[in-house]
Every structure is written in C-alpha cells, then in structure tokens.
Amino acid sequence: MGKITERLYNGIVKENPTFVQMLGMCPTLAVTTAAINGLGMGLATTVILTMSNLVISILRKAIPDKVRIPAYIVVIASFVTIIQFIMQAYLPELNDSLGLFIPLIVVNCIILGRAEAYASKNKPLPSIFDGIGMGLGFTVGLTFIAIIREFFGKGKIFDIDIVKLIQDNEVPVLNGIVSSDSFSTINIFTSAPGAFFVLAFLIAFINHRNIKKAKKEGTTPNVCKLADCAACENVMCQGKRKED
C-alpha cells in the first residue's frame, strides 16, 4: 500500500502535471474559462490515463520496443474514442464546450509520458494508481485555475452567481466586501491572456512556498536548468535539474 499511496501523492502534489511538470498546457490554458470545463476535462483525462496505463502495463512485455509509441497511441486513441462517445450521449453540453480538446487527449503529453515512463516498466496495479494520481493532479490544477478565472471573469463558480448567493444569504463576513456595487468582473480573466496570468501567479506562489520551506528546513530547492534538457533526471519534464 505504501507504493500506491506514493503514486497518488506524487501525481497530486509532488509531481503535479500542471504546477510542477508544466505538462498539458494546451487544455490547461484553453478550457479553463469555466470550472465545469476544467473539472470535466480533468476527469475525462483521468479515466483515459488510468485505463491506458492498465492496458499498456498488461501488454508491456508483448509490445515490441520498435513500435511501442504507435502501440501506445492506438491504446490511448481507443479509450479517447470511447470517452467521447459517452460524453456525446450523456453530457452533450460539456462535450460541445470542450470541443476539439477531447480528441486531442490522444496526443496529450501527460498520458503518453506516463505510458512511456511508468506503465511500460511497472506492474498493472501501481500503473493504475499512477494514472489515477496524475489524473487527479491534472484535474485539481485545471479546476483550480478555472475557478479563479470564472470567479473574477464572470462572478460565478460552476455557473453559480457567487455575488448574488452571498447577498441572498446575507453572509455577514463577505456581504460588505462582495456585493454588486463593490464587485465588478474583469474580462481579461475569460480571455487567453487571463489564463497565462492565473497560471503564472499560481506557479510563482507555489515556487515561493517551496523555496521558503526549503530554507526553513535547511535544504536547497532544486531549479530547472533549461540549457541542457537531455540529461534530466525527471523523465517527464526533461529539464536539467541542479541545486541552486
């Protein structure tokens, strides 16, 4: 169980695809205009990541090394097609909102990267939880960014008018701060530059906390050295890490 817990912790916190490894930036920046989009995209990716990790792990000894990447893509594409059909049938509005980004999961570097770096080298059970951990980490990243963008851009979270909700329920702490008179939406948060700003501030905040924590513990934080990616110990980000 220790290894399973480690895989979940790594995916959600230590090796978070969005905030640590900076993977899957295309859907991260494009679909996070609404919290429901971020949550839907993240959960769809989680299911595909988990199932593809399972199948690739089971077939890891049967897939010839020379054709492993095409084989991985075929497996991933099969699950993407199934998920898209399910969403078209039961969640048509979400499917229309996410649009082209659902089929583009096939080439999402998170899924292909985990297949190559972990599932192809490990047994099915750890691979399943590696997929769940990475998928949940991606979901948390997308949903958190989307909540910030939707709130400041539209005054809503999951399409719920937060300002009106606070006023109707007369929340004493927030009622004087968040009101229709004092709160105005910022349109840039619903546009492409808004996604970059939110992501940049969140990563800066996380890096600041990591550096502060490392100094408090008497350790030195690791930083990326972009000049030499080939020798990176982190298989996913391929950035040369060294002590600052």
Image (cartoon, rainbow, N blue to C red):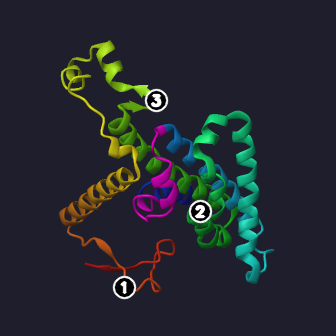
Q: Nearer the viewer, residue 192 or 159?
A: 192
**Badge 2 element:** loop
Q: Nearer the viewer, residue 46 or 82?
A: 82
Q: Which residue is mark 2?
A: 108
Give the image location of residue 116, x and y in percent: 63, 72
Lower sequence index among marks 2 and 3: 2
Residues in magenta, as a range: 14-35
Give the image location of residue 11, x and y in percent: 49, 57
Q: CA distance from mark 1 to mark 2?
A: 24 Å
Quarter of the image where one finds residue 61: bottom right
Q: CA distance from mark 2 to mark 3?
A: 27 Å
Judge the density around disc 3: few (<14), some (14-19), many (≥20) Cα neighbours within 10 Å: few
Instruction: Answer with left or right where residue 41 lies relative to residue 148.
Output: right
Q: Which residue is mark 1?
A: 227
Residue at left 27%, top 55%?
Answer: 205
Lower sequence index among marks 1 and 2: 2
Position above or below: 182 against 201: above
Q: In the picture, which quadrant includes the N terminus?
A: bottom right
Q: Which residue is mark 3?
A: 159
Lower sequence index among marks 3 and 1: 3
